[in-house]
Amino acid sequence: MAVVIENPDAARSALIDLLRREYTFDHDALIADVFGADQAGLCVLASGWGSIEGVLASRPETRCAATTRALVVAAHERALRDLLLAAPRGDVLLFLVVGDWTLPTLAELFDGREVAPHPPVSYPGIHLFVGVRRGSGALPVIDDNTLFRGPPLAHAALPRPADGQNLSSARDPMVARLRDLGNAAGRRARSQFLAEGPLLAFRALDDLPVEDLFYTGELLRDPAGTVLLRRAADLGVPAHRISEGLMGLITPTRPIPSVITAIWGQLRNVADYRPGRRAVILATEQINNPENLGMTLRTADAAGVEAVIVAGSGADPFHRECVRAARGAVGRIPIYTCADLPTWIGQARAQGIHVVGATGNVERTLYDADLPLPLMIIVGNETEGLTDATLAVCSSLVRIPMAPGQDSLNVGVAAGVILYDIVRRRLCDRHLAPTKNPTTA
């Protein structure tokens, strides 16, 4: 998650250091404009674990037809998502981003479009994107001339979504949408998925682009339910009341959940993925049980993995059971799909990524193996493990040592053992150990 850098000098230094480390173009004019003499309204967020991997510097727009201008610099996809998910609802944001690889993520999380650079917003190496956070309305019709001519828009310029309704018919279009989100094809077509229960609703409202939520009378009998609905109202998220009977038509989960949340999200192809220079990536091959996949995603999120590659035709990461088991990781951590894992492994190795397959059929243990960065760990199917084709193209293979009597672990547990050994190594390495938190500098 992104955190605020309170000290302006520390914020400026963090942004300059990140630009110098990751990119090579001249950024002096850009920095001067962002950190000008008048810093009223300047807000700087940082993302990363142990080191700063992304910075977002925003301030109220003063020239263009937008609410806020935001410069975003990120070393990799996870750092980028952490920053973008902290953007406010209801504002028109003019993003200045480094790297065209950032644009698909912006298009996933924001309703908007790329804009050709034009004075007064034109810098070397910078791409422009104007948009509003998904779930908070549609981008107003603003042509390029109007955008760059201004005037600036007020904060929360978009009209608030309509108030929630009482839904009583299975034929209601909103109920039909929810039922459609119960299957993988509907989720792909609508670019949305569902999260069930109050805990995931709270987490979604805090972190994710929520479209709306639906609740039964049972939620009102829970003291936390009133807090949840007030939070949704404060954010401008419509909350619709439905009967338990309708909720039972929408989801097969029993007991029937008291609330479900509709969230924007897409699964992009791994061909779109740009690994960071010191990436730790997790790939899963043909995990069929959605709860196992969800626990694996939760573990990857907690261990700071840069991205997860879900390979094969196994469980859908947006399946309700996977979303529930992931406990908020789905939608926040970058997830990519891959139809041909062995081929992509070859491409990853050609980029210098060390690929380690987890299997029980080798002598070398995890604790005897070198794990250089950038690194990809691959875990396999619950019963069959990794396919022969995948094993054949890995850089190396390792096993997790076990006492006599057991020869395998749950895939989520196995992923956790390996990933947290990598965390231990990174924290023990003096070059990668956490540095002073710039937010308090």
Image: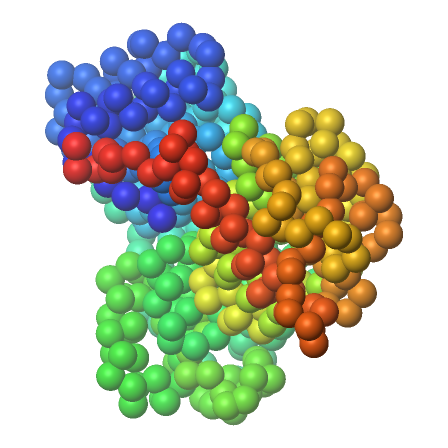
Q: Position of residue 384 (x, y in %)?
A: 80, 65
Task: Give the side of residue 29 with respect to residue 419, left or right.
Answer: left
Percent across and percent down for residue 60 are: 22, 32
Q: Which residue appears at 26% of the width and 16% of the height?
A: 33
Q: Is residue 162 in view?
A: no
**Most foreground residue, 425 or 57:** 425
Q: Is residue 327 above or below residue 433?
A: below
x, y percent for residue 295: 55, 66
Q: Toward the viewer: 65 or 191?
A: 191
The colour scheme used here is rainbow
Q: Residue furthest front?
A: 404
The quarter in which the C terminus is drawn is top left
- Vertical position of residue 71 compared to residue 426: above or below: above
Please, is residue 379 above or below residue 42 in the view?
below
The answer to whether 318 appears left or right of 150 in the picture is right
- Residue 29 placement: quadrant: top left
Horizontal arrangement in the rendering, residue 97 relative to residue 412 (left or right): left
Q: Say above or below: 13 vs 193.
A: above
Q: Residue at x 46, y 12 (%)?
A: 24
Q: Is residue 207 visible?
A: yes
Q: Quadrant of residue 253?
A: bottom right
Q: Residue at x 21, y 27 (%)?
A: 10
Q: Position of residue 305 (x, y in %)?
A: 51, 47
Q: Which is more toward the observer, 110 or 398?
A: 398
Residue drawn at (54%, 89%), measured in percent from left and top? Answer: 254
Total marks placed: 0
